Image (tube, rainbow, N blue to C red):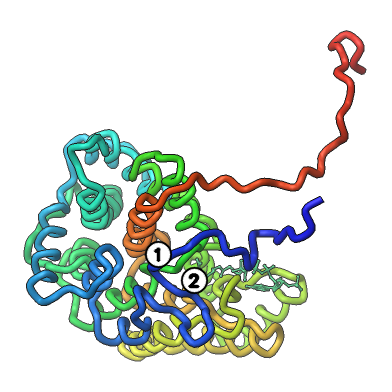
C-alpha cells in the first residue's frame, strides 16, 4: 500500500524547473528570477516572452528584432482560414484555438525543417490572428486582414483586430499587463500536460494543443469567464453579498477564488485589480467594480479565500470591451509563452513522465466464460 498519496498531486514535486517560482517562501512569483511586480510594472509582454524563451532580458535591439519576427509570422495560411470559416459560430473559442493549433501542425509540421524556436514564435504570433479571424468572420465582418504592420505588439494587434480601429495607450497597457501576469506559472495543470506530452517525444503542436485542452476547464483557465458571469449576475453590492453567502451555504464554488498553491493571496491579483479599478473609473462602470470588491470581502470573511488572477482579470477584460467568451483564449495566447519554455526545458533533459497509481480495484478473479455469466 502506498502511504502518501496526495490527491490532485497536491504538494508533490514532480520535476525541476528554472523557469519560474510560485509561492516559494521569500520568492513568491518570479519568471527566470525576476519578480512579477517588477515585470508587470516595467516590462512589455514581448520582453517577458523573450525572457521566458531565452532565459535573459533582451537588449533594445534584440527586442525590436524579436517583435519584427513575431510580426512577420502573423499570417494565416489559406487552408487554415478555410478551416476557421467552417467552425460553427456557436463553438467555444477554446475549441477554435485547439483545432487551429492542431491544423497548423498539419500544414507546418515539426519535421526537422522548422526549429522548435520557430514554431514557438509562429504560435505566439498566429494565435491572436486565428482567434480574431474566426470571431470577426462569424460576426459578419468577412475575412479580416491579420497581418497589419502598423500594430507592433501582440496586445495592440489583438485589440485593433477586435475593435476594428487602434486601441488607446491605456487599453494596450492594461492588456499587456494581463498577458504578462498569465504568461507562466510553473507546474500548473496545462503546463504539466504540455510536459507530459513532450516527455513521450511527441511533437510541439501536440503538446500545445494538450495545454489548450487542459486550460479550458473552469478550475483552471476557464475560471475567468465563469467569474465574469457570476459578477454580472448581481446588480448591487447588497445582492452580491446575499448571493455569494447563499452560494457558500450550498457549498458552491465561487469562481476566481482560491488557489492550490497560494493560500495567502495570489500576487497577480493585486496588480490586475488596480487595472480593473483604473478602467472601471474611465468607463463609468464603478458598480461592477464595487460588486467585485464586495464579493472579495465576503469570500475573505466567510472562507478566508483570496481572489486569484482570474477574478480581476475578468473585470479588466470586460472593461476593455472584450467579449466574455474570448477571455480564456487570451489566457492561451499568453500562457503559450510559458508552455513553449517548458517544452524546451523538458526536451533539454527529457525523461518519460510516468507515475504509478495505487490499485483500489477487485482482487484477482477467475475468468467467467460468456455463457456462464448472469
Ligand atoms: N469557492 C468556494 N469554496 C472554495 C473555493 C471557491 N472558489 N476554492 C476552494 N474552496 C473550498 C472548497 O470548497 C474546500 O472546502 P471544504 O474543505 O469545506 O470542502 C476547500 O476550500 C479546499 O478546496 P479544494 O477545491 O479542495 O482546493 P484545491 O487546492 O483543490 O483547489 C482550486 C484549488 C483553484 C481548484 C479551487 O480553489 C477552486 O475550485 N477555485 C475556483 C476555480 C478557480 O478560480 N480556478 C482558477 C485557479 S487560478 C488560475 C489558474 O490556474 O487557472
Q: Nearer the viewer, residue 268 or 192?
A: 192
Task: Using the image, determine if residue 155 lies above or below residue 222.
Answer: below
Q: Classify mark 2: helix, strand or loop.
A: helix
Q: Looking at the image, which is closer to me, 282 or 33? A: 33
Query: What is the secondary structure assignment of the residue under circle 1?
Result: helix
Q: Earlier in the sequence, mark 2 or mark 1?
A: 2
Give me the disc on residue 228: 2
Q: Comparing marks 2 and 1, which lies closer to the viewer?
A: 1
Q: Disc 2 to disc 1, how far (Cα)?
A: 9 Å
Picture coordinates of residue 71, whole percent (x, y): 12, 59
Q: Residue at x 40, y 40 (%)?
A: 201
Residue 370 position, x and y percent, is: 84, 11
Give the residue drawn at x 36%, y 68%: 183
- Ligand 1 position by quadrant: bottom right
Residue positioned 55% across, 61% down in the render:
218
Where residue 204 sits, quadrant-wise, is top left
Across and down, in percent, residue 364 comes to: 86, 29
Q: Is residue 103 visible?
A: yes
Q: Determine if residue 91 is in view.
A: no
Find residue 168 and report its image quarter: bottom left
Q: How many marks?
A: 2
Give the answer, above or below, for where 215 lies relative to 176: above
In the rendered view, does 64 fall on the left or right side of 25? left
Local crowd size for mark 2, using a 10 Å CA cut-off: few (<14), some (14–19), many (≥20): many
Where does the C terminus fall, quadrant-wise? Answer: top right
Please state the horizontal and vertical placement of residue 305, each as a whole percent of the image: 63, 82
Q: Residue at x 49, y 87 (%)?
A: 26
Q: Which residue occupies the foreground of this view, 48 or 296?
A: 48
The residue pinned by badge 1 equals: 327
Labels 2 and 1 touching (C-beta < 8 A): yes
Amino acid at each position: 500500500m502506498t502511504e502518501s498519496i496526495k490527491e490532485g498531486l497536491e504538494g508533490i514535486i514532480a520535476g525541476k524547473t528554472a523557469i519560474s517560482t510560485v509561492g516559494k517562501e521569500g520568492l513568491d512569483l518570479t519568471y527566470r528570477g525576476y519578480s512579477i511586480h517588477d515585470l508587470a510594472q516595467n516590462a512589455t509582454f514581448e520582453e517577458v516572452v523573450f525572457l521566458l524563451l531565452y532565459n535573459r532580458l533582451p537588449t533594445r535591439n534584440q527586442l525590436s528584432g524579436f517583435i519584427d519576427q513575431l510580426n512577420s509570422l502573423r499570417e494565416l495560411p489559406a487552408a487554415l482560414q478555410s478551416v476557421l470559416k467552417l467552425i460553427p459560430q456557436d463553438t467555444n473559442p477554446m475549441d477554435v484555438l485547439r483545432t487551429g493549433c492542431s491544423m497548423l501542425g498539419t500544414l507546418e509540421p515539426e519535421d526537422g525543417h522548422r526549429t522548435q524556436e520557430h514554431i514557438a514564435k509562429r504560435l505566439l504570433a498566429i494565435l491572436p490572428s486565428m482567434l480574431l479571424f474566426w470571431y470577426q468572420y462569424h460576426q459578419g465582418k468577412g475575412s479580416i486582414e491579420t497581418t497589419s504592420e502598423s500594430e507592433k505588439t501582440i496586445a495592440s494587434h489583438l485589440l485593433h483586430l477586435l475593435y476594428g480601429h487602434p486601441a488607446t495607450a491605456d487599453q494596450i497597457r492594461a492588456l499587456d499587463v494581463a498577458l504578462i501576469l498569465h504568461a507562466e506559472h510553473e507546474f500548473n495543470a496545462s503546463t504539466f500536460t504540455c510536459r507530459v506530452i513532450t516527455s513521450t517525444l511527441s511533437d510541439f503542436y501536440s503538446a500545445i494543443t494538450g495545454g489548450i485542452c487542459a486550460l479550458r476547464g473552469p478550475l483552471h483557465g476557464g475560471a475567468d469567464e465563469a467569474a465574469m458571469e457570476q459578477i454580472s449576475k448581481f446588480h448591487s453590492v447588497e445582492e452580491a453579498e446575499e448571493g455569494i453567502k447563499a452560494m457558500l451555504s450550498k457549498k458552491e464554488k465561487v469562481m476566481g477564488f482560491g488557489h492550490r498553491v497560494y493560500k495567502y493571496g495570489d500576487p497577480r491579483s493585486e496588480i490586475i485589480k488596480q487595472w480593473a479599478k483604473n478602467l472601471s473609473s474611465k468607463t463609468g462602470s464603478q458598480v461592477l467594480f464595487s460588486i467585485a470588491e464586495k464579493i472579495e470581502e465576503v469570500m475573505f470573511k466567510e472562507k478566508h479565500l483570496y481572489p486569484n488572477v482570474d477574478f480581476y482579470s475578468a473585470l479588466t477584460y470586460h472593461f476593455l470591451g472584450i467579449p466574455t467568451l474570448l477571455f480564456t483564449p487570451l489566457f492561451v495566447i499568453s500562457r503559450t509563452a510559458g508552455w513553449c519554455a517548458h517544452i524546451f526545458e523538458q526536451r533539454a533533459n527529457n525523461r518519460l513522465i510516468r507515475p504509478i497509481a495505487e490499485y483500489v480495484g477487485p482482487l484477482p478473479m477467475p475468468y467467467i466464460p460468456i455463457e456462464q455469466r448472469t
